[in-house]
Amino acid sequence: MITTTDLTKVYRSRGREVTALDGVDLHVREGEVYGVVGQSGAGKSTLIRCVNLLERPTSGTVSVAGQDLTALTGRGRGAAGSALRQARSRIGMVFQHFNLLSSRTVRDNVELPLEILGVSGKERTRKALELLELVGLADKAKAYPAQLSGGQKQRVGIARALAGDPKVLLSDEATSALDPETTRSILQLLRDLNEQLGLTVLLITHEMDVVKRICDSAALMRDGRIVESGKVSELLATPGSELAQELFPVGGVPSGEDRTVVDVTFQGEAATKPVISQLSRTYNIDISILGAAMDTVGGHQVGRMRIELPGRFEENVVPIGFLREQGLQVDVAAIADGPRANPTPLLKEGAK
């Protein structure tokens, strides 16, 4: 549904060049919720604004629903400009700060894109009320933005984004200005719309919890490049995945000798089995749990646990093999001679 190929965006100011996107290849399947995460300055916002050509890329191509948007100039009032406007009307956009017009009622805000498209007044009203019902704000049609909570404002923004019956919904940090409870309700609304309307949703976020809650696939951006991407369930089973480590952080690696530290990833039925206690009983070894995290991803229980086994790696080959035989992903984090892997956090709490 969304494909970017070798996408580059260079900003020029006062004789300096800043590369915001550096050859980005992105592939978002039809009907999925796709999350893009990364630190501030990674290029996330520029990427999503290039998808609907709010920012025109310096080079590369953007295709949505099989149409190459970068081939449309958008200049003038003729056929070329009309083609880009029509293409954009099939791409909804939800903003971080809502961007509602304070002088217009909730219903009028939702009607605005339909008004621009030349839809008749009666049809605009019908459509706006239908969308407000869909997002749970039918009783707020005559209210003004100043009378709404942050979550309600964002629901209006989502209703407005759906006015043109888009195939794609873009979300630019849509929940970062909201409290946790409201964030959960907005994320659930996005997932519901994805399922009910068959929407393809591309969202950017700095919050890993957003990826865990609603994303089917995800990509990690750094310095204008995508450094890792794929289905969330597959990333969790990928040895050394940075996204998996961030989604389920399990702490650092302790210092000391004669110990082996491994990270164990549980998915599906394996997440409910007492595998660690079975391991301890079977091989009569004491196991230290250094950290653990479990959550529901895509409707399935997923978790990671960091455990310490006594002895060197060579002495633990059989116990590690036992874990893998149970269908678990096992990555060696540290061995007696020193850390095998001790990744630094990708995102700091509160990062924008």
Image (cartoon, rainbow, N blue to C red):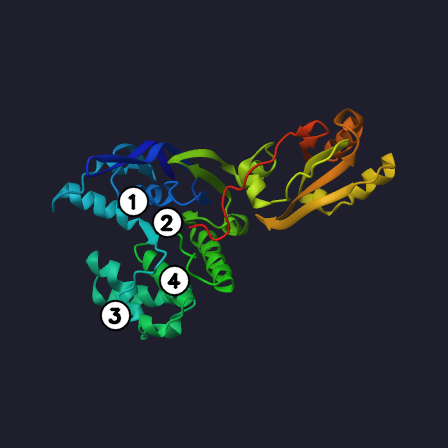
Residue sitting at the far top: 314
Measured Cα–Cα span from mark 3 to mark 4: 15 Å
Q: Which residue is mark 2?
A: 170
- Which residue type carries mark 2? Leu
Q: Tell me the number on the disc at residue 125.
A: none
Counting other residues with Cα less than 10 Å from the Cα at mark 3, is it few (<14), some (14-19), or many (20 or more)? some
Q: Earlier in the sequence, mark 2 or mark 1?
A: 1
Percent across and percent down for residue 41 are 37, 43
**Disc nearer the start of the sequence (4/2):** 4
**What residue type is disc 1 on?**
Asn
Residue at 32% x, 33% y: name it: 7
Q: Is 179 located above or below residue 27 in the figure?
A: below
Dividing the picture into quadrants, the one containing residue 10 is: top left
For badge 3, the amino acid type reads: Arg
Residue linked to disc 1:
52
Does the CB distance between marks 4 and 1 fall below 8 Å?
Answer: no
- Reading the chain from its start, which is encountered first: label 3 or label 4? 3
Q: CA distance from mark 3 to mark 2?
A: 23 Å
The residue labelled by disc 3 is 104
